[in-house]
Image (cartoon, helix red, strand yellow):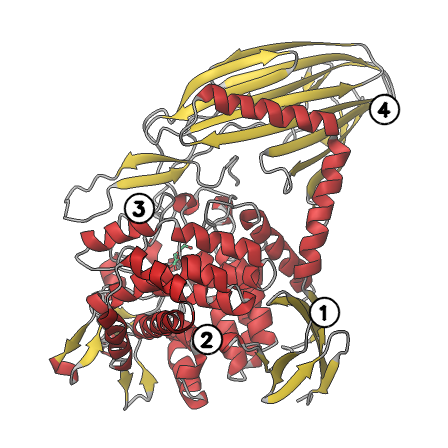
Amino acid sequence: VSQNGTFINGFYEAWPIEYPEEAYGFAKAGQTMVNVADGKILRLYVDDEPFFLPTAHLLSFERALDMRAGTLDREVLWETPSGKRVSIRSRRLVSFEHRHLAAIAYEVTVLNAEAPVVLSSEVLVRQHEQGRENDPRQAPGFEHRVLEPRIQTAANGRLLLAHETSSSALQIACAAEHVLETECNSTFDSEVSEDEASVVYSIDAKPGKTISLVKYLAYHTSQSSPPKEVADRTHRTLDRAVQRGFDALLTSQRRYLDDFWERSDVLVEGGDPRTQQLARFNLFHIFQAAARAEGAGIGARGLTGLAYEGHYFWDAEIYVLPFLIYTSPQVAKNVLRFRHSHLDDARQRAAEMSESGALFPWRTITGKEASAYYAAGTAQYHINADIAFTVRKYVEASGDRAFLEEFGAEILVETARLWADLGFYSDSREGRFCIHGVTGPDEYNTVVNNNAFTNLMARENLRYAAETVRALEADRPAAFAQLVHRTDLAPTEVEEWERAAERMFVPYDEQLGVHLQDELFPEREPWDFENTPPDKYPLLLHFHPLVIYRHRVIKQADIVLAMFLLGREFSDEQKRRNFDYYDPLTTGDSSLSACIQSIMAAEIGYSDVAGEYLSYAALMDLADIGGNVKDGTHIASMGGTWMALVYGVAGMRDYDGRLTFRPRLHGKMRRLKFPLTIRGQTLEVDLRRDRVSYLLRDGDDFTIEHFGERLTLSAGKAETRTLSSD
Ligand code: BGC
């Protein structure tokens, strides 16, 4: 099963969320990514017989995603019902360099006969094909016409359809241009209607003579320009593309990806032979989803499907950005700047939720909260701290203080304000600062008091905000003055944040010797894991939320994630005890879980468990572990795979921007090698069973830590340490 979709990041339709029982402050405007005009369609007829892949008699077939070239290639040998042999080769790409451009090169050769060949190239708007099938993770279908026709043309083989979304009033134009090369006689004809445009080439094919058609596709969208203007942009994109030709596109695509792999490739040898390919497949997908997401976020499924409606969640900051921060910092910065651009919406949302500061939406495209289910949605206030945490990681790893001054500090002030207002000093907890009525990362325990993850991350948010403001005040008076101006910051606020951080309550059970995911966690009724057959997972599809919420059962890493992100807050002994307690209760019903369990298992020395979780995370999409890859790839797990290798296997930690390593290969792995971009320099880590080398490729001396030993690296000179092989 698969879904045919053409998606543009951030291009959505709005719809009113209707609640049978309304309440104040519920999210009102649904936002759903739209399946836009499909320009990929090329239909082939030989002797007027259609080439239809599912039923065609194929003598050979190969389809390959070339992750170095950035193309999808297909080679088919088809025998028609009358015995004619037809070779069909296609290669297509969505250009990285030219943001609005895609292209398909299509070659047909009738090998052993003459035949009339027809090639029909189309641009087609499928108005609404998506349904929900009782799975809340899927996008709801639309009941209205989503794309209203604005302009349609077809002249000299160039097709254009321009539409406007009916509620969100966004403009989109899709245009296609064709270049046919053949020695055989040919004619063409075109047709156009509101949702469909086509050009049909009729060719008298001669045996062995290749017919080549290149189709260039341009997409432009706009929030404010009129349809004609948007349509004109597609024409200019196409004119330029045709002039340069398909080979130039291939070359630029390759160059773009060479750069990417140079900065990002992870080499894995030994162990599960699939891991190498999976690692690359996952990184390639992240790059596709993020590289040109300028002015947009990274959706939970990238641009590969409609699940979660194309929404941006914390998946981007906590799961995907670490990889981008250490390999493509500019891309990471774009994503964070995009968050910053939603700050006003987040301020309004905080006010609506009776808080000061800003509250970022749990899920969104436009910046407005789009979560219609507050328990497992809006209540996840930790999104604020996740963003603040990642601002810090980006600034420390990149050294980009300008970003901190211009954008980051404002996010920190507003998010810290929210925490200071949301929590309170509780008499029943000896005046400790408590945060009630929120949901942590684990969506199977909702609207709880004192979720440890939230409290710890909020504390970090408060501390970093205070630290940043104080540093600006001391060292950068102009930037500080601007910040005060933009946020109306009062001198007493920073002290309030510091006090709240210091008095933060973190639930801990002395008897069990573990941190509590939330205050009441151990009091819930145990889940009957023994009598829950595999077909009852994920639980969310088989049990009412209340049934799940009242039991001691976990969807995804929560405390275990806190132990990774804020590892210094836990002793080694606590980490092991917490992991032992929570791991058996964790279903992994969310794809955001396995990678984190892997990292922490590695840290506490459970190498086999770590290896197993790593495989899950890596295989999530290619082996369809979650059973729903038809709705799109799991971008968080893809980023998580990188983290499970770098933070898990290589044992990297980056507290305060200082890199430390405690590497140890899992199971039968023989080698792991990866580069990291840090403050503009490149560090290469090459790990084998018995040794590890750290090589600084360029720049000034750089200090790291290897099992507690400080190593000062000089450019070009590898430092190698032996590892015990137990
Ligand atoms: C997870 C969330 C995640 C969302 C989007 C949910 O199933 O529980 O943590 O943000 O999916 O990937």
Q: Secondary structure at mark 1?
A: loop
Which labelled disc corresponds to residue 111? 4
Circle 1 crowding by C-alpha within 10 Å: few under 14, some 14–19, many from 20 = some
Q: Secondary structure at mark 2?
A: helix
Q: Secondary structure at mark 3?
A: loop
Q: Earlier in the sequence, mark 2 or mark 3?
A: 3
Front residue of 218 and 188: 218
Say which amino acid is labelled 3: Lys
Q: Earlier in the sequence, mark 4 or mark 3?
A: 4
Quarter for ligand 1? bottom left
Residue on which disc 1 sits = 698
Say which amino acid is labelled 2: Phe
Distance from the alpha carbon under mark 1 to that under mark 2: 30 Å
**Residue 88 in picture, x, y percent from top left:** 76, 29
Q: Does mark 1 have its CB less than 8 Å from ligand 1?
A: no
**Residue 446 in picture, x, y percent from top left:** 26, 64
Distance from the alpha carbon under mark 4 to that under mark 2: 60 Å
Front residue of 701 and 607: 701
Say which amino acid is labelled 1: Asp
Which labelled disc corresponds to residue 368? 3
| Label pair 4/1, CB-CB below 8 angstroms | no
Q: Quadrant of the C terminus?
A: bottom right
Residue on which disc 2 sits = 564
Distance from the alpha carbon under mark 2 to that under mark 3: 30 Å
Which labelled disc corresponds to residue 542? none
Distance from the alpha carbon under mark 3 to that under mark 1: 43 Å
| Label pair 2/3, CB-CB below 8 angstroms | no
Residue sitting at x 63%, y 81%: 703
Say which amino acid is labelled 4: Leu
Q: Earlier in the sequence, mark 4 or mark 1?
A: 4
